[in-house]
Image (cartoon, rainbow, N blue to C red):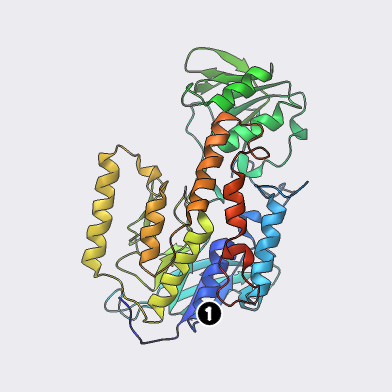
Amino acid sequence: MVSPLSLSKKVCVIGAGPSGLVAARELRKEGHDVVVLEQRYDVGGQWLYEPNVESEDPLGRDTRRFPGHRELWLYLKDFCEHFGLREMIRFNTSVEYVRMLEYDEIGKDLKWMVKSREKSSEETAVEEVFDAVVVATGHYSHPRLPTIKGMDTWKRKQMHSHVYRVPEPFRNEVVVVVGNSLSGQDISMELVEVAKEVHLSAKSLNITEGLSKVISKHENLHLHPQIETLQEDGRVVFVDGSWLIADTILHCTGYSYTFPFLDTKGIVAVDDDRVGPLYEHTFPPALAPSLSFVGIPRKIIGFPFFEAQAKWIAQLLSGKRTLPSREEMMHSIEEFYRSRDAAAIPKHYTHDIGEFEYCDRYGDHVGFPHLEEWRKQLCLSALVNADANLEAYRDSWEDHELLQEALQSPHFTQLLGAEDLTF
């Protein structure tokens, strides 16, 4: 529903990665007073590459189709500068606590106390009151680790792919890579060039043609089923009874959602990676629209989806649009959960979308354009190509006509001065 009414709110955005930046832009466009709190020294989120990971817990050429992390980070910096977002961001500021202020009726004129602290400052933490909080902390910061018997007492090196940077430290080692998703496959292909042996442990031995080609090409790359147990002498025992002695285990097992700073009195919780209840993966019905989340869904074309989320949040807070009733939103969430259960989709895949149609339906809530056909086809083409040609799919493709169509789109041809430049 659209209303001509326009209200200005004081809004705190937590995070200055892709989702936080576009949220800040849309909120300010709607006339809101915006403060962005970012714990690192610059914008970019996961794309702000830090080669030195010693402080991390080990377990916590020509134009290319696939840009590197630096190119993506520079794009986000340009986006930030173009829209004048930096003035709203407090860098090196960690959010310690976010809580609701006490009100007789939750959800009515709700306000939030946000406690933050500048990392380099000796000053006490700052407490501020906001009309709304947008959580845009992403989902690539808290490593998800498997449960393996003996994992806590295994005396050799273990780490999560979150802190992996380059293959050289693993030279001449025997490395077990747990998980054969894209990160596990990519890291394995780097490691085979320097490691003595690389052993890829997967849930299923039914692998893609592309991975099969890579394994057949490298004598030091081996495929195994899941790990059954880790033993103190360094042995890694697999469920088929085979075993080996490894120097390092590298867990490429994804990430978990976590919001340690957020206190909603139990209204929003994370249960086996299901953040909920959230209407359309964005709004907790009892607290919306004063509390919202940007960037929760996975397996989507992220940037356009984040932009649609940001527009919806900003226009709800300004009063231009309204949400369904709390009861209607809860009913929608329950129906969604039932549909996932009926499809036998595990709870921890709740936010894995994997369909263009949902992104288009989401955009309809705020009049956001549907994904272009060329964008969908380029995405599908890359996935198909990766399955068949894992080592070279980033630099070899047969869909030039789609790329040419993309280059003629407004994303590449519109003037940089346009106020509605898309994300």
Residue 386 shown left or right of residue 326 in the figure: right
Image quarter of residue 328: bottom left
Closer to the camera, 13 or 95? 13
- Residue 225 appears left or right of 200: left
| Residue 168 shown left or right of residue 36 in the figure | right
Horizontal placement of 35 versus 371: left or right?
right
Q: Which residue is mark 1?
A: 28
Residue 227 position, x and y percent, is 51, 23
| Image quadrant where residue 123 sits | bottom right
Q: Is residue 417 visible to the viewer in this orientation of the structure?
A: yes
The residue that appears at 70% across and 65% down in the rendered structure is 41
Picture layout, residue 385 above or below residue 357: above
Q: Residue furthest top?
A: 241
Give, as a three-letter code, the residue at label 1.
Answer: Arg
Residue 368's spot in the image, x, y percent?
A: 43, 67
Identified at 46% across, 79% down, the residue is 130
Coordinates of residue 73 in the picture (x, y in percent): 68, 58
Query: Circle 1 sits in a helix, a strand or a loop, which is it?
Result: helix
Residue 174, percent from left and from top: 69, 22
Q: Nearer the viewer, residue 355 or 403?
A: 403
Q: Is residue 233 visible?
A: no
187 relative to 212, above or below = below
Residue sitting at x 66%, y 43%? 163
Query: Label 1 neighbourhood size at 10 Å, few (<14), some (14-19), many (20+)?
Result: some
Question: Toward the viewer: 240 or 354?
Answer: 354
Residue 179 figure quarter: top right
Position of the N terminus, as image quadrant, is bottom left
